[in-house]
Image (spheres, rainbow, N blue to C red):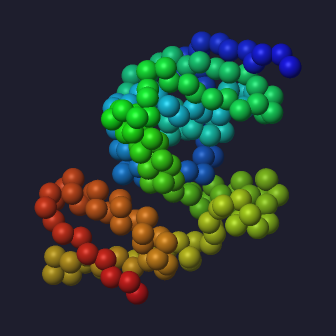
Amino acid sequence: MPSPKTKTRKISDYHFDEQNINKGSEFGTSLLHRSISETGMGRSALVDKNNVLIAGNKTMEAAAQLGIEEVIEVETNGRQLVVVKRMDLDINTPIGAKAKILDNTVSKHNYREDAEVVAAIVEVAEISNLNDYGLSSFNKEEQEVSFLAKNNVIKITFNDSHSMEYAMKDINYLVNQKYPGAIVTAKGL
């Protein structure tokens, strides 16, 4: 099997996916910036043959915002696993442990499906069962959130506990940015 071709390119050589299903979150984006700033690049991106990002839109955007310009591109046929080997990292050091933690928490906290984009893409992809692909429902009624503010209390109602769990992380982050020391409480339905 021939060796994959590698090239050095610029981030500006690539195009963001205009129908990215991941809207990201403010908290997740802050974790991604922290990950890159504190531990360097570890995540990779996936582009098609036309240099359009399939995966890693948020990573590419954050890298560019943090001044990273250079990209090492590896051309493959999809039957090879590309491994990023960081010669400066050791998992048994504080920086290696931080890289491990941040990479996984970014994945957890920075994924928010864009219901409208999912609805359009599943049709093109000929997907009928969203759960088979790990997608959420794109029924807008299920995604509704209601707000009520009275006497310095903001009440937010979610239609399910899964949505509330993810939102609480973002809510806590935003409240701590604007009102340090404020207490956020959550009650189940």
- In this view, 181 is above or below 161: above
Q: Position of residue 6 (x, y in %)?
A: 68, 14
Residue at left 44%, top 34%? 91
Query: In the shown orientation, is residue 41 left or right of residue 184?
Result: right
- Nearest to the observer: residue 19 or residue 25: 25
- In this view, 65 is above or below 133: above
Extreme residue in the left direction:
181
Residue at left 21%, top 57%? 176
- In this view, 18 is above or below 79: below
Q: Position of residue 68 (x, y in %)?
A: 44, 21
Quadrant location, the N terminus: top right
Q: Is residue 94 visible?
A: yes
Q: Position of residue 71 (x, y in %)?
A: 55, 19
Q: Is residue 15 visible?
A: no
Query: In the shown orientation, is residue 185 left or right of residue 141?
Result: left
Extreme residue in the top direction:
8
Extreme residue in the right direction:
1
Extreme residue in the bottom direction:
189
Q: Position of residue 25 (x, y in %)?
A: 43, 52
Residue at left 38%, top 83%? 188
Quadrant location, the C terminus: bottom left
- Nearest to the observer: residue 89 or residue 52: 89
Q: Quadrant for residue 90, please give it.
A: top left
Residue at left 62%, top 66%? 136
- In this view, 121 is above or below 59: below
Q: Quadrant for residue 89, please give it.
A: top left
Query: In the shown orientation, is residue 97 left or right of residue 180?
Result: right
Q: Quadrant for residue 168, please give it.
A: bottom left
